[in-house]
Image (spheres, grey):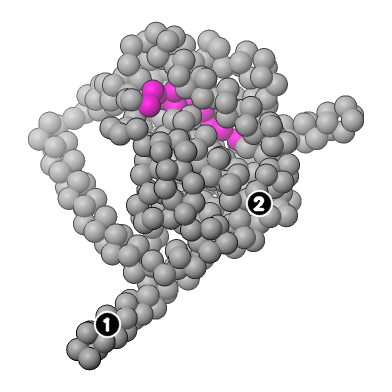
Amino acid sequence: MRTLRLLGATCAIYAGLWLLAGVWVDADRQDGGIDSRKGDHNIYRTPIREVIYNLPALCRRGQDRRHLFVIGGSTAKAYRPEILTHFLPNWTVSNISLDFGNITQARQAVSLLRQCLGDGAFARAKFVLGIEYILFSENKRRWATPYTVLETEMLRHGLFAGSPGNLVPIVPWQWQPFAISLMRPIFAAYGIRYDIWQVMIARANKLGDHLNALDAEKRRDREYANLVGLMGPAEPAVMQEQREELDRLIAEIHGQGAQFFLLDMPVQEWLRQRSPHFTMHRGWIRDYAHSRRVGYVDMTFDGVDEDFADGIHANAQGAERWSDIAGRKLADALLREEVEGASGS
């Protein structure tokens, strides 16, 4: 009897927490596409969790929609779905760009999306990869384990299982929204813990900057050293692994009947001038897009200094301006593709 009372009390407490967490979720409910950047502020607390745990609901309501998906790394989160939708009113625009990313992780996100939506839905989808040279960082330089950050989160709560690069759902897609709903108190607890950790990190970074009295040039030196650490030697072979991943990504998207665009993202002038990796990237990307018959939108030089939070990431002003520019360019490119496709048929 005592065990039953304890079990009942536990269930009652969890139900209360579930209702409280539901207020948090309902305040941020999405009826359109997914925006990974919302995960910085809502119950999930990271863009990667935002994508994983909102994806089943998108797939349930979005089978027959025309989708535009922005994919890539943390820099591509700059492209705001609410702004892009102004230029593409008949499309459901989602940004599923992920932090700690390279082409491998972007490809895994697309694979996850295909599993969830089903093969037929890709025939009505278009993909825009926000690309810059840092996206070609090798897997061994990005993660300490064979699993990407995306896969690590997929494994966390038992919804998926499998070997690196080959995760499959344990809970069927149609049941995942219910399983995710049940876990709301767990997500809320994670969010509180995450916030505390971020406050500690921010204070440590602020103290470190104060002690080091970093001026703008020293900050750039530190940022450049971090980027070099992610890329390795400035040799073509360093980018080969991720170029092959890009080949596979394009082949898989085209194989499902979807269209693919490369959007070359803004890089701040000082970094363009300083980085040999940037020069290497620019030396082949346009010809690569032409040889693979994919759309190419060049925004490399569209960013002004006031747009950047660092050498490659947009601040709030930059995200708004880049989204406006990208929306106009993508609308033109999509219209051109559709006209050419219609004339070709």
**Residue most extreme to the left:** 211
Sooner in the amino-acid sequence: mark 2 or mark 1: 1
Within 10 angstroms of label 2, few (less than 14), some, or many (20 or more) residues? many
- Which dot, 2 or 1, sits closer to the camera? 1
Name the residue carrying label 2.
92
In percent of the image, x 44 and y 9: which residue is there? 236
Q: Position of residue 217 (x, y in %)?
A: 25, 23
Q: Does the magenta portion include 272?
A: no
Q: Position of residue 103 (x, y in %)?
A: 48, 29
- 2 on left or right of 304: left
SS at mark 1?
helix
Name the residue carrying label 1.
7
Within 10 angstroms of label 1, few (less than 14), some, or many (20 or more) residues? few
Q: Which mark is residue 179?
A: none
Which of the pair 293/334 is nearer the observer? 293
Image quarter of the N terminus: bottom left
Label 2 amino acid?
Thr
Q: Quadrant of residue 247?
A: top right
Compared with residue 211, is residue 320 higher up or lower down, i.e. above or below? below
In percent of the image, x 39 and y 8: which residue is there? 235
Which of the pair 174/183 is nearer the observer? 174
Q: Position of residue 32 (x, y in %)?
A: 61, 58
> Which region shows up in magenta?
128-139
Which of the pair 309/54 is nearer the observer? 54
Q: Does the magenta portion include 132?
A: yes
SS at mark 2?
strand
Q: CA–CA distance between discs 2 and 1? A: 44 Å
Q: Position of residue 319 (x, y in %)?
A: 49, 41
